[in-house]
């Protein structure tokens, strides 16, 4: 794997810190997250009358109608930057496919027999490709719904159906992602906020990656 990540090590008083994400990676990640949350919450407000109350948080119905598509465009742009940076590291290899077949063990914290994970494990990679696919569908169908008057009827009908389905898939993926990045894997969140993890964390969750950066 071509790691461009600055993976330097430095000894702190009590633990060895390992750089997990560079400042640029973290900035892009949180820009993606903010744009995604804005597009999601404003989209939910427009989607269901029961959720219309959400629009009050974002300046009312008219503002939300006008700005939701721009939130989506911003999300797509930031995600494209993230995609460019990470897509090579997210390619699934033989170990990843074996990991996915045994993913039920990971879910119950029994990692025996699971292939070692590199910088990203197979679940993270799969979620990345899922978000890239549903994000692309959201963008394409969103553009059709933004300018319905110049779009053919069939395209409009397909988009009305696909746009919310892709949104539900994306939101489902995000719920899993946030759970994994916070409650399920303590230490991961600090990696994405402060940029570093402990060597114990790296060795236990991403042992192949840990060995690679130790060799440098
Ligand atoms: C909004 C709340 C979010 C939180 C709390 C969060 C948290 C995190 C954390 C802690 C990591 C580092 C995991 C690790 O070191 O292994 C991470 C990585 C990542 N995040 Fe997020 N994230 C959020 C939103 C998003 C969104 C909206 C996307 C894209 C649609 C996204 C895409 C990614 C990707 C592709 C990675 C690298 C692979 C992975 O860890 O899954 N994140 N996130």
Image: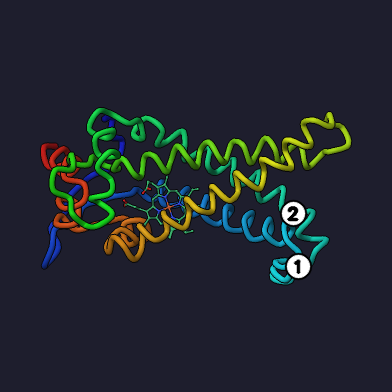
Residue 151 lies, in percent from the top left, at: 83, 31
Helix, strand or loop status at disc 2: helix
Q: Do the residues under discs 1 and 2 have CB atoms within 8 angstroms?
A: yes
Question: Mark 1 or mark 2: which comes first in sequence?
Answer: 1
Q: How many marks?
A: 2
Is residue 208 toward the left or the right of residue 70 in the image?
left
In the drawing, what numbered circle is on residue 59? Answer: 1
Secondary element type, mark 1 = loop
Instruction: Indicate if the residue with disc 1 has its beta carbon within 8 Å of ligand 1.
Output: no
Work out whether residue 160 or residue 17 is closer to the camera in this orientation and state it: 160
Camera-side residue of 195 and 156: 156
Q: Where's the N terminus, which quadrant?
A: top left
Which residue is depicted at the point 68% across and 59% down? 42
Residue 186: x and y in percent read 27, 64
- How packed is label 1: few (under 14 Cα within 10 Å), some, or many (20 or more)? few
Location of the C terminus by quadrant is top left
> At 26% from the left edge and 42% from the top edge, which residue is drawn?
119
Residue 123: quadrant of the picture: top left
* Left or right of residue 167: residue 45: right
67 in relation to 120, above or below: below
Q: Which residue is mark 2?
A: 67
Q: Nearer the viewer, residue 210 or 53?
A: 53
Q: Is residue 135 left or right of residue 51?
A: left
Could you say where residue 154 lies in the image, as x and y percent from the top left? 80, 30
Q: Quadrant of residue 50?
A: bottom right
Identity of the residue drawn at 34% across and 66% down: 183
Q: State the residue in front, 90 or 167.
A: 167
Judge whether 198 appears above or below 143 on screen. Answer: below
Mark 2 is surrounded, within 10 Å at the Cα level, by few (under 14), some (14 to 19) or many (20 or more) other residues, namely some
């Amino acid at each position: 794997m071509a790691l461009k990540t600055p993976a330097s090590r430095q000894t702190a008083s009590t633990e060895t810190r390992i750089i997990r994400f560079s400042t640029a990676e973290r900035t892009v990640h949180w820009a993606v997250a903010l744009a995604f949350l804005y597009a999601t919450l404003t989209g939910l407000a427009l989607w269901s009358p029961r959720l219309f109350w959400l629009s009050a948080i974002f300046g009312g119905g008219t503002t939300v109608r006008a700005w939701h598509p721009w939130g989506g465009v911003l999300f797509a742009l930031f995600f494209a930057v993230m995609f460019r940076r990470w897509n090579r590291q997210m390619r699934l290899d033989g170990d990843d496919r074996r990991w996915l077949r045994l993913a039920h063990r990971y879910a119950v914290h029994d990692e025996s027999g699971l292939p070692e994970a590199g910088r990203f494990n197979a679940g993270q990679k799969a979620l990345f490709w899922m978000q890239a696919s549903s994000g692309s569908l959201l963008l394409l169908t969103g553009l059709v719904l933004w300018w319905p008057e110049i779009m053919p009827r069939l395209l409009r009908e397909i988009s009305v159906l696909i746009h919310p389905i892709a949104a539900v898939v994306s939101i489902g993926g995000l719920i899993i992602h946030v759970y994994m990045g916070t409650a399920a894997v303590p230490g991961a969140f600090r990696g994405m906020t402060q940029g570093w993890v402990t060597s114990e964390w790296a060795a236990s969750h991403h042992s192949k990656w840990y060995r690679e950066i130790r060799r440098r």
